[in-house]
Image (spheres, rainbow, N blue to C red):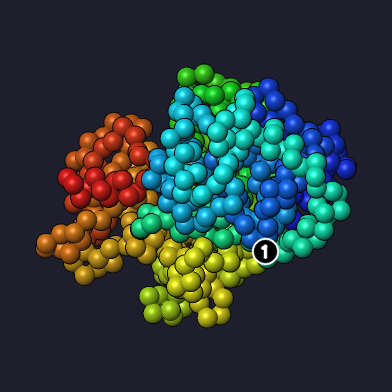
Amino acid sequence: MHLPPPFPRIADYARYYAERTPDAEAMVLGDVRISYAELDARVDALARALLAAGVSIGDRVATMQTPCPDYFVTFLATSSIGAIWVGLNPKYRLGELLYVVEDCQPKLLLTRLEVGGRHYDSEVAALRGTLGLASVIAFDAAAAAPGIQTFADFVAGAAVVTDAELAARRDLVGGRQACLLVYTSGTTGKPKGAVLQQQGIVEFSIEQNRIWPVSPLRELNFFPTNHVGCTVDLATPCLVAGGTTIFMEQFDPAESMDIIEREKVTFWGSTPSVFTMQLAELDKRPRDLSAVQLICWEGAAISSEALDRLMMICPNMCTNYGQTESTGAMTGLAPTSDRDLLLNSVGPEFPGVEIRLVDLDGNPVPDGTPGEVLARSPYSFIEYWNRPDASAEAYTADGFLRTGDLAVRRPDGTYRIAGRIREMYKSGGYNVYPREVEILFEDHPAVSEAVVVAIPDAKWQEVGVLYVTLQGEATAEDLMAYARDRLANYKLPKRIHILPDMPLLPVGKIDRTALKRRAAEA
């Protein structure tokens, strides 16, 4: 797989492939197919329009859009002139939208006025008032309206910006300059905006393609545009490799499998929960997935049953471990069919990353002992937006990112994730690591997914509550009897609930906060 050199700006890769493979497909949405030549032209046109609108280096440009070509063009154009792109999820309610725009104060808002039958007139009006904007730019407006400029009219303003002016601005942009503001999920409070940088995203994308070589690279991207998975894990590495991103605006399991078959997707990336839904669709109607060269999951461990089924489709598989603040992966497993590695590890250190595991006092822990993951790399985020205290707390004095995640280093040098520090709980004075308990239950042949959450207990301080989904027949009593022979009593969940489906976050991860709230209310 040929990989280009590192360029200072992410958008430089659109120009690189526009010059070398101008007719190659860069992006697909339904029947719309956009070549690299067209992508580069669209990025330049929008970048000029942003300059004409007075967007300066460091200004924020907010975009409410689905996973589609317009979203990615906006990100590339914004970052190419040194502004910071902020994604807004169309599924957000008004309060969530207001929180983000009030926090980051964008210079411009580019938005959809309707998505999936939901109209955003009142939301756009409220955002305009909060931002004090004279106008917002609407991707889908057929004609201008009070306070609303059409996207076509906005881009038409680019004519006043010369080639020399665009080039001069871009000469000032690149390296560890801020380009992307991603608001974390906020499971422990209000979301914080993690500021990611051009160099980190570019170098991460090159290394990801190096350890996961797929050619030709054709991927399906349905992740929310405000999530790091959409832009950093999928869209940008695909651009850097000169591949094709097939976008899907609204995720549907059956349609996703139709697209993978029809578009001959070669890199099938998802989350374990979404794989479960997609495999269920294959049970209803098989598809020809012979084009798939590599299957990858992120965000959680996969079940042995799902792994075995996926391996029958493509034995070349991989996974990794990362978070928003690390700008992608901190560990990465090279393509393999080794079940132990795939089920029980997230691989060794990702290229360019140093990892240290420490106890609560900051002391290194031996192999086989859970410790907090500290990671140092050139990819990591710059800071939390407007949060100097939180930014300072995020790093150690010698530059290691404090992840808040617990991991165990295995004898083979790979890492196994043991959960979050805040998910660990004490029961009767003993530390309980939920992931250890979850793995045991996921090994039960009837269990598909298992999640342990902790709730306060008058006698034991805290106790675990287990939620499972099933792929076979079992009762809560059956599962408890199974665990009693395999777990110390203090690790046993005090209650087991069987659910038809797990609650999911928009990105497809299991919503542990919702389960914890349900357990507390019960």
Can residue 39 be spotted in the picture?
no
- Where residue 187 sits in the image (x, y, percent)? 37, 54
Number of numbered discs on residues: 1
Residue 202 location, quadrant: bottom right
Pointer 1 residue: 177
Q: Residue at x 68, y 22 (%)?
A: 31
Residue 303 image position (x, y, % from top left): 44, 43
Q: Is residue 106 left or right of residue 43?
A: left
Compared across the picture, whether 342 is left or right of 11 comes to left
User: In the image, what residue occupies the spot 68% across and 48% down?
Assistant: 53
Picture residue at 35% right of the left edge, 58% below the top:
188
Secondary structure beneath label 1? loop
The image shows residue 195, relative to residue 475, as above or below, that is below
Compared with 362, 333 (above or below) is above
The vertical placement of 246 against 286, above or below, is below
> As rendered, which of 52 and 26 lies closer to the eye?
52
State the residue at coordinates (78%, 57%).
170
Quarter of the image that includes the C terminus: top left
- Taking 450 as reference, is 201 above or below it? below
**Along the viewing direction, whichever of 159 and 388 lies nearer the viewer:** 159
Q: Residue furthest left?
A: 459
Amino acid type at circle 1 is: Gln
Q: Nearer the viewer, residue 518 or 423?
A: 518
Q: Residues within 10 Å of mark 1 (few under 14, many from 20)?
A: many
Classify residue 55 as left or right of residue 501.
right
Give percent across and percent down for residue 48: 76, 46
Residue 316: x, y in percent?
A: 63, 42
Instruction: Confirm whether residue 361 shows in the render.
Output: yes
Left or right position of 513 against 120: left
Which residue is at the far top? 285
